Image (spheres, helix red, strand yellow):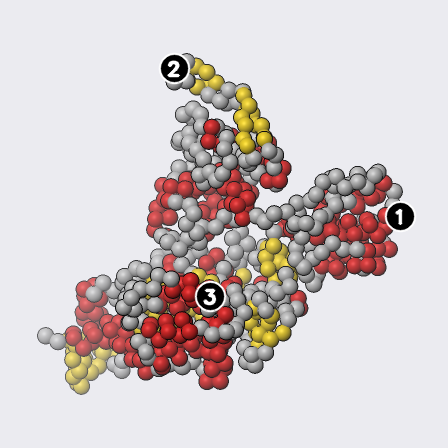
Amino acid sequence: MLNFALGGCLARESFALSTCFYWGEAEMGEDSNGTLVPANPVQVYEAKGDFIDCVGGLGKDWTSPGRRNAVQPCQGGDDPKEPSGIDLDVIIAALHSLPNDGRFDYHDWVRIGMALKMEGFAAGREDDAEDAWFEWSMRFSGYDDQLATKNWKGFQSEARRSDAVTGATIIWMKNEYEMEKSDPPPAEQLLTEDDVDPATDARLKPSSHKPISPLKKLDGKDIPAAARQGLLDHQTQAKGFAKVYSNWLKYDLTEGVWRAFDGQTWAPVNEKQVRHAALLYCAALEAFKRSNLNVLQRKQLLSKRYATDVFDTAALMPEMQITHDQWPHHPDLLATPAGIIDLITSKSREARPGDLIRQKTAVAPGGDCPVWLRFVDDATGGDRDLALCLQVWAGYTLTGHTREERFVFAHGVGGSGKSTFFDTISAIMGSYAGVLPMTALRLSKYDQHPTDLAGVSMARMVTAHETEANAKWNEARIKAMVSGENTQLTARFMRRDFFTCSPRFKLSITGNEKPQIQDTSGGMQRRLLLLPFMHPPARVDRDLADKLREEWPGILKWANDGAFIWHQCGLYVPDVVKRETQKYFEAEDYFGSWLQEATERVLQEKCPASRLYDSWCAYAVDHEIEPGSQNRFFPEEMQRRGYDKTTIDGRAHYLGLRLRQ
């Protein structure tokens, strides 16, 4: 109950007792016989080795250890549930720490949304709650934007049922998840003011804080001389802290997260872990100056308050900060668990903090991949040119270059290998890869959430899976995404300021159905490559994913060879890809089809533009496509196809054609 009242801020270690007791009271209700009794009378509840932070979780189901249902309804009367009173930012942070990978069912998803809307309404920040709901929901692979929007609009701002969840339950879910995935406490310990009695220097209990790798417990010589010999004020020591850690820790002002160099890349870390570095620093300073300090000074140096002041001051110093555009590009370097690879020379070296590289692949390259090569051969029907095209595209995605200004759409019947191919490459690329929901690429009358793009702004490979038949792409947005350094896109991270960036990723879309395209001119045709996957296997290998996972190092080496080919020759586009792409654009050229079917060329004819446009609109409606504007789209298309316009008696006419009878 104490942790519930404090908004879930206490660490779970505070509850690591073999038997814990909690008690509380609630309003009056009726028992099964209709007698008025306390609905939750003052009594002791016992939980064996479990962590409870919501009174709704107390009851007989809590007397045995083990995993509980994700969302526990609160017990008691029929009165509507009140908001938890927990700060909304705490609730949202708890939600975003939860993975949305299918562990929660539809019922859980809806009730979490109801809780967010109720808490957001109570805090006067319903828009922030809505942003959090949609961003978390979009992480699910089966996300349905229309369903999410419909549900959010239908949620009540105030609870109507006694079993409605509140923000406290979301925090409980976060704690449950962290308890499942957490490692045992590390052997290396840290002394804080609670660990040390200043009078006796006795070690009272072990610390549960996990140090940031590769940071270690410091000694006096690690602290700059100016700080060792200077005053104990937090301004002086903050400068010393920044001197020690600025090459290992950075706060990203754009993203709003701390990052630490872990020996390979600059990985995101929790702020509590970063504050641990300040405790390390202060402990080392106290140990070095111990002989010159009195008991009160030693206690001050070992106090959490002093370490907090040092950390907060150091965090404001420029050397501890970085912005999104200050992370270097390094387009020809690839970070792997074994080191940094030069994609041009294939030479490797150890990673260095000064590289400021944030991403790395899941494995290091090496070995062979016979199963993968057989899979590619089967998926392409033995077409070696198409297989080479796939290899070079995979190699191109390893790089940070975007100068080809191309994207691919892999299409074919289900089970033909297209998703397996791109999902495997994406998984191997680790944090270099990202996923966009198709809602970010489809044409919609609503603006897409800018956090979609922020999440992949530094990726090198982005995949999307099209599942909707006859979907219409947002062609202008896709063109901007694949135009590389020639364009600037605007995005923002959740609850952060907007920033501009040049896309670094190569877009790969898979789908069974080809989408509708309005622009059949050179703009889209120059950028799109249609990759045919037309050869589903005769026998499905249900262990294929596991077999391919064992070959990830060899597959990365195969893709690295593709990068070498790309550096030497550029993209390889075989005839089969050119033909498929050309056929697709011809089939999507509804305007050209209308001209062929509804008009005929007659050299001396002059046809009123209004009659031609009316005919085109009727054709477009019959084929369920947008006709475009009469003042811009229509004249541009007519001019592109070689028809001149003139004015006769104040009305626009086109020369050289007439409508068929």
Q: Secondary structure at mark 1?
A: helix
User: Which tag, 3 or 2, sits closer to the chain's start?
Assistant: 2
- Vertical order, 518 against 87 (above or below): below
The amino acid pointed to by label 2 is Gly
Q: Marks 1 and 2, how far apart in space?
A: 72 Å
Assess disc 2: are there few (<14), some (14-19) or many (≥20) residues with their C-alpha within 10 Å of its C-alpha: few
Q: Quadrant of the N terminus?
A: top right
Whether residue 255 is visible here, answered yes or no, is yes
Q: Is residue 525 left or right of residue 184?
A: left
Label 1 amino acid?
Ser
Residue highlighted by disc 3? 550
* Tag of residue 34: 2
Q: Amino acid at mark 3?
A: Glu
Q: Is residue 184 above or below residue 386?
A: above
Q: Residue at x 39, y 31 (%)?
A: 160
Q: What crowding class fits label 1: few (fewer than 14 Cα within 10 Å), some (14-19), or many (20 or more)? A: few
Question: Where residue 291 is drawn, which disc sits there?
Answer: 1
Residue under the point 54% across and 35% down: 50
Question: Residue 205 occupies which quadrant of the picture?
Answer: top right
